[in-house]
Image (cartoon, rainbow, N blue to C red):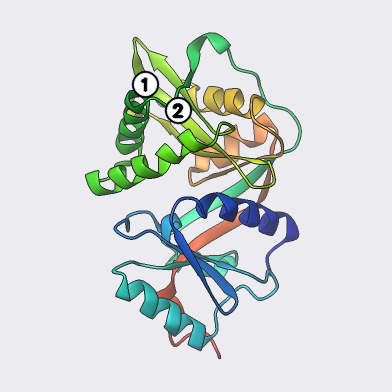
Amino acid sequence: MISPSLYKAFLEEQTIFQHFGKNSRLGNFNFFYSPGANQIPHWNLIYPLDSSNPLPNQNEAIQLNDFYKMNLLDGHILVTDPKFRDTASEESEYFKLENFVIRSSDSAIEEMTHRENDLEGFCNLIQIAFSLNDITTAYFKEKMSILKQNVNSRFYIISVKSRIVGGCSVFQTSSGASFIFNVATLPEMQGKGIAKDIIGYAANRSPKPVYIYSHNSIMRESILPKMGFCSLGTMWCVPIQSFLGVVDG
């Protein structure tokens, strides 16, 4: 069973991902797949269509696994039961802005335009911050270019001497809510409050409600709660192979 508030965040998130990759449905699941991009589990993620029945039966698990295998991808199912923690490829805690955001200084932050050279700089930051390979970075750049098609979506960056040292992207959902993604800081600039500044700056300029998720324990435990974000719950990206021969039909 997925809590209503967390499931609402997943529904909002899916309206964004539908613009990025390909998606289809099988039984009780809406699954997303990104041909040629297999490094990030979230890009090949399977969402349940029924929050009260979130796990695949044996037949569904076989069909989903066969589909991803045929496309040379590793499919992952979204799971909120912590008993799957040890088999997960990725863990994310989801938050929603409920109270206030610590305002950051406008002088240090610039809004990125949608010019190609700005996109290049942002993607270079993401590649360094998350240690992505060139193929994944190229795919990421292609998907970030979708921002050009939506005036309500934004990049925000912090620059020092014309070098991008931190940033994030904000995408608007089909209902008008905002999702903050890709919060990144150069490794040598971490611990200087850049992540807090960039999140605060972006959140204050984004349509509400504002959602964000994070894999980082410091972000989840120390930064986001102090900025007015309330936890909706944690999800794990669990390889679909983990369900083969485990779940009942």
Extreme bottom residue here?
249
Residue 18 sits above or below residue 147 on the image: below
Residue 3 sits above or below residue 232 on the image: below
Answer yes or no: do the residues labelled 1 and 2 have beta carbons within 8 Å? yes
**Amino acid at the residue labelled 1:** Ile
Q: Which mark is residue 141?
A: none
User: SS of the residue at dot 2?
Assistant: strand
Residue with the mark numbered 1: 164
The residue at 68%/33% (across/down) is 207
**Amino acid at the residue labelled 2:** Gly
> Residue 230: where, in percent of width, then height?
70, 42
The residue at 35%/35% (across/down) is 129
* Mark 2 Cα-neighbour bin, 10 Å: few <14, some 14–19, many ≥20: many
> Residue 118: where, in percent of width, then height?
37, 24
Residue with the mark numbered 2: 167
Residue 52, image quadrant: bottom right
> Residue 105: where, in percent of width, then height?
58, 12
Residue 130 sits above or below residue 66 on the image: above
Q: The N terminus lies in which quarter of the figure?
A: bottom right
Residue 89 sits above or below residue 240 on the image: above
The residue at 36%/36% (across/down) is 126
User: SS of the residue at dot 1?
Assistant: strand
Q: The C terminus lies in which quarter of the figure?
A: bottom right
